[in-house]
Image (cartoon, rainbow, N blue to C red):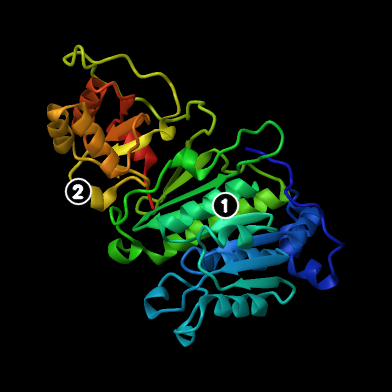
């Protein structure tokens, strides 16, 4: 989606700035006017780790005028295979301080603002206010949702990236985009975080370093496009990176009830005639539904979709036999409020259809995802 420039051009470039950026200002999409926009921009990067390292390095190299860095951690040896901004000699040093020093060495013209704080509901708005765009490279669900909600409240565009193992995702969220562009937020894509402890972290599941470089570079690119106003921004789309096959595709989603492109609906057997498949559900926003992983907890822990809630179909069917109240209580215990629309999924689609049949019998708004649907939605963080 093409958007107008986020930042007005700043003062004319100095001779040193013109020399430093000569290769990129040759691009007609950028030019000297675009470079002046970058120099006038204020960008906040949350996380100076695996994603933050390439994001920060490329934004500083590109000549972004002011870069804020948020992190409250120290450099650890286990970080170094992917957090390439840091080095062996920086082990034990505060990440914000070391990252700031490295960026100033690379481009002395960039103003670096250091925020050595933990982002939570109390600090987020104060830290984020005053920046033109925010890039989230954090690695916890709680922080991601706090940042996304703060950006939505402030109307600041958010460039979002996530990685795990060999999979990555990149998207852009903006609650108040210009003109008649539809707003989209993280909660339009993933309405709620998964239950605590239900999804393994990178420390538990692993991550390959070069993938951080790929996804972080894509995030930096999206920020530059937003600031300068060229190309198609990933607003309303998620770029999905499969590093094992080196395939990148995008999945559209919406924040206004419009159907996402590229996501087919699975047929759901009806409760009144479970032997016959129902017609495809109405083309509502699939990603506006709560994702319900109906596999067993061990399967869920390995490769759950980001934001999914785990309720095994066996437990759901047992609760339904007890009564609608027991099934509703089971869902609420897993973090699914009463009345929200659901999308069930599993590995092969069989259990998803069983769960959808059970839920339809309880008068729940439900769609079952096919394996192809699930494949299009991977990876998750």
Q: Quadrant of residue 135?
A: bottom right
Residue 346 visible in this rendered orientation of the protein: no
Residue 181 visible in this rendered orientation of the protein: yes
Q: Is residue 128 above or below residue 279?
A: below
Residue at 58% of width from left, 41% of height from top? Answer: 235
Residue at 31% of width from left, 31% of height from top? Answer: 369
Question: Seen in the image, is 58 located left or right of residue 16?
Answer: left
> What mark, if any, has residue 297 been given in the picture?
2
Q: Residues within 10 Å of mark 2 (few under 14, many from 20)?
A: some
Residue at 41% of width from left, 30% of height from top? Answer: 286
Whole-percent x and y of residue 98? 56, 80
Write down the residue under mark 1: 150
Q: Earlier in the sequence, mark 2 or mark 1?
A: 1
Q: Quadrant of residue 18?
A: bottom right
Residue at 29% of width from left, 47% of height from top? Answer: 304
Q: In terms of depth relative to the viewer, which is nearer, 240 or 26?
A: 240
2 vs 1, front mark:
1
């Amino acid at each position: 989606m093409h958007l107008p420039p986020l930042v007005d051009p700043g003062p004319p470039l100095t001779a040193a700035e013109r020399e430093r950026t000569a290769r990129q200002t040759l691009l007609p999409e950028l030019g000297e006017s675009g470079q002046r926009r970058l120099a006038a921009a204020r960008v906040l990067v949350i996380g100076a780790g695996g994603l933050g390292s390439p994001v920060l390095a490329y934004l500083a190299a590109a000549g972004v005028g002011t870069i804020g860095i948020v992190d409250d951690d120290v450099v650890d040896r286990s970080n170094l295979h992917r957090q390439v901004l840091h080095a062996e000699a920086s082990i034990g040093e505060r990440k914000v301080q070391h990252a700031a020093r490295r960026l100033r060495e690379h481009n002395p013209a960039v103003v670096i603002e250091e925020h050595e704080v933990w982002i939570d509901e109390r600090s987020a708005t104060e830290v984020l206010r005053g920046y033109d765009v925010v890039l989230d490279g954090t690695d916890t669900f709680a922080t991601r949702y706090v940042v996304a909600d703060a950006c939505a409240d402030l109307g600041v565009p958010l460039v979002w990236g996530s990685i795990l193992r060999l999979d990555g995702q990149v998207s852009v969220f903006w609650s108040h985009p210009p003109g008649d562009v539809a707003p989209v937020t993280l909660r339009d894509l993933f309405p709620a975080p998964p239950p605590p402890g239900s999804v393994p972290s990178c420390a538990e599941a692993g991550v390959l370093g070069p993938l951080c470089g790929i996804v972080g570079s894509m995030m930096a690119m999206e920020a530059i496009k937003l600031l300068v106003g060229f190309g198609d921004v990933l607003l309303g789309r998620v770029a999905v990176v499969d590093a094992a096959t080196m395939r990148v595709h995008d999945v559209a989603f919406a924040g206004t009830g419009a159907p996402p492109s590229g996501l087919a609906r699975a047929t759901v057997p009806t409760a009144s005639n479970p032997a016959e498949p129902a017609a495809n559900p109405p083309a509502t926003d699939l990603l506006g539904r709560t994702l319900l992983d109906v596999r067993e907890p061990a399967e869920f822990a390995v490769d759950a979709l980001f934001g999914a809630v785990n309720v095994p179909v066996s437990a759901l069917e047992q609760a339904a036999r007890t009564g609608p109240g027991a099934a509703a209580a089971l869902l609420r215990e897993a973090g699914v409020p009463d009345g929200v629309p659901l999308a069930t999924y599993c590995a092969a689609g069989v259990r998803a259809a069983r769960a959808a049949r059970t839920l339809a019998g309880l008068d729940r708004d439900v769609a079952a995802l096919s394996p192809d649907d699930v494949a299009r939605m991977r990876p998750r963080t």
